[in-house]
Amino acid sequence: MDNPENKLSDYIDALNAEKEPEKHQGTAGTPELEKLLATVRLVRTLKEPAMPSPGYPQRLAAALADKIQKNNTTGFRQPVEPNPKPGNRIYETAAGRSRRKRILPAVAALVAGLLLFAVLTSWTGLFNPDVVYAMEKAVAQLSNYHGVLEMRSKNAAGEEWMIRRVELWSDGDKYALRQNDGTMTVNNGEKKWQLRPQKKEVALLPLLPDPARNGFDLRDEAKRAKQYPHKVVGSEMIAGRQATKIEISPPGGLAYYLWIDAETNLPVQLQTAMQNALQTTLTFISFEPNTGINPKIFAYQPPEGFKVVEKDPGQLVATVEEAAAISRLTPLLPKEAPARILAFKDRIVLDYGDTTIVESAAGGAFQPAPNSALGTAAGGPLEVWQERLRWRQDGIEIQAEGTRRVELARQIAGDLTLPDTGKNMVNKARVEVPVDMEITKADQQQVDRGSSPWQLDPLQVSLTFVNLMVSPEGITGEPEIPAASFKLMTNNGAQAVVEVAAGPVKQVYLKRLVRQDETGIWSVVGYDPR
Amino acid sequence: MNAPDELKKAIEGDLKSIEQICIATWEPLYRFIYFKVQNREEAEDITQETYVKTLAYLQKHKMPWDNLPGFMKTVALNVLRDRWRQRKRRGIPVNFEEINPEETAGMDHQKAVSQRLQIENALAKLSEDQRIVLDLRINKGYSVAESAKLAGKTEAAVRTAQYRALQALAQILDDSD
């Protein structure tokens, strides 16, 4: 144990087991060894962190509440123990009973065997640890690029055809794309326009928000590949470049493929799964990363003889007052000042670079998207849908989209609460409804293919469930319990409760059993009879 | 903007409000801590301790809600420093440079990427044998026995090779500073 080589090795083993080495292995002893331990930690930063088991924030909150309560009853004491004792840690069960999972030796051996198998079958070069991390890094470092993206489709009979080809220029916030017919769309960060040679016109377009810039966003692909289970399945030549083929498997969905250029580590081709007998492949048939792009590409210079078409493209303004005068709105502002303000006749857009806030006058009733999760903001409902938050406050509808949406939205609505994903809402059901997971998985794949989208809406699923109880032979014509009788009470993105105003059922309890995001279908898992 | 009601309720011990705050804030903080300690057990401990200390502070002092994430990172760094000091008393030398709060607090994504590049460049300067052993042991997380089998070495040779590889890597990183 005193041997420094052994100490170092034990330290690595403790980190690999996600344990605190000093607690289990003792101390380093010498400055030289300490330096080597620090180097181990540095090398390890190349890996993605091991995240706590699900429900961690809830367990953390419970431990904190307990601590605060104790402090409140005994008088507050500043915690002094820099190394909390094991009894103070958050374990997976409450009541202080440790249930930290121990892997049985036989299971451990099996896991080790499987790992060995995985490395032997996917050995694609040493210290090329994860091609997806390399891609993420390459995409983060990409300052600009010029390329030609081709989109092709193939049917189940193997016939293939080209749908379209676009030439792309991208440089920081600026981009330009030219389609087959010569139509060119440019966003130079100050203006967005479309040059239409056939009509001899230039259309000025709203600068923001600017959704997906093209169908194959490099950053999005890198993010998705990292988030879903993936594996290297081969190496192929794509458009004259050697590329690593990876298979990405979204939970409960069909696998699709991404090819990553072996030299640049950037995605070069994407192929969707065969859905509805159709498969789409997007390929960069040419791609020049970090290249010199002619600045004229992004310069707004309408060619002579072209008519300028303007349909409220909005304008950049210097102050909120100017924006208010143009839009006739009194915007609600986050504490942090936006980088840019755009004013339209009916809305104001606050641009924070990575996040955009759009404010417009609220009209009609607030209708959250059916497959969104619900939180609360400004005393009313908050729609949480993908990377977007939407709510109403003081007669204004506010939409925040982007990475800092929660932080900025909280600066407007201080009471904003997000859906509580850890809460179990459906265990209160008086009658449990058994679910066949095989059928549910097949339903999910059907919805992924674009069929039966109603299964993404908890209200529609409840409506079908209740009406089939009333008319077991099938629903013909108008359902007996109409849609107006169904009201979404809660939806945290994973579980939902729907209240029914009439009929034999009072409340329907639903769960997203296959995938807990906006693409996941809802299944009825219980109900309360009236 | 003043501290919102959520924070006030949390400080009073309202579980629901504490949960809301934890759900909204735990992940960036945990990742920040994990980046420093590189193991889940310690990262979970320090995350919990950071929340306890933050709420304790907020029971006596006012804090704007917007400053909370930055404040918590600073608290986490103090907890880390306390732990390092504790170890120093137990005989472990403290590398205070490594926990320089200004440097670490300002460590944004770009800095993390450049640190990653620096490590990767240093790894590229190692011999292939050294890279293999670090890849198997640290990156892929195999045991000494598994790594020995995969690399066709004895277990003792793996231990020696990883020791020498890390010595070489530390030297390269020192030289590049």
Image (cartoon, grey):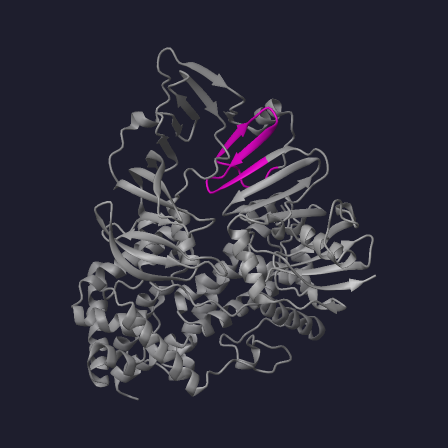
Which residue is nearer to you in this view: A476 or A418? A476
Which one is in front, B62 or A509? A509
Quick one: quadrant of the C terminus of chain B?
bottom left
A495 left or right of A143 in image: right
- Image height check: is B125 above or below A368? below
A393 to the left or right of A521:
right
The front one of B54 and A253 is A253
The percent coordinates of residue A67 (x first, y second) are 63, 72
Rendered location of residue A457, percent (x, y) = 64, 50
The stretch in magenta equals A333-358
Screen quadrant of the N terminus of chain B = top right
Q: Is residue A447 above or below residue A28?
A: above
Instruction: Name the residue at 31% across, 58% down.
Output: A131
The answer to whether residue A73 shows anywhere in this view is yes
Residue B82 counted in the magenta span: no
Q: Position of residue A300 (x, y in %)?
A: 37, 22
Task: Answer left or right for A69 relative to A517.
Answer: right
Q: Quadrant of residue A492?
A: bottom right
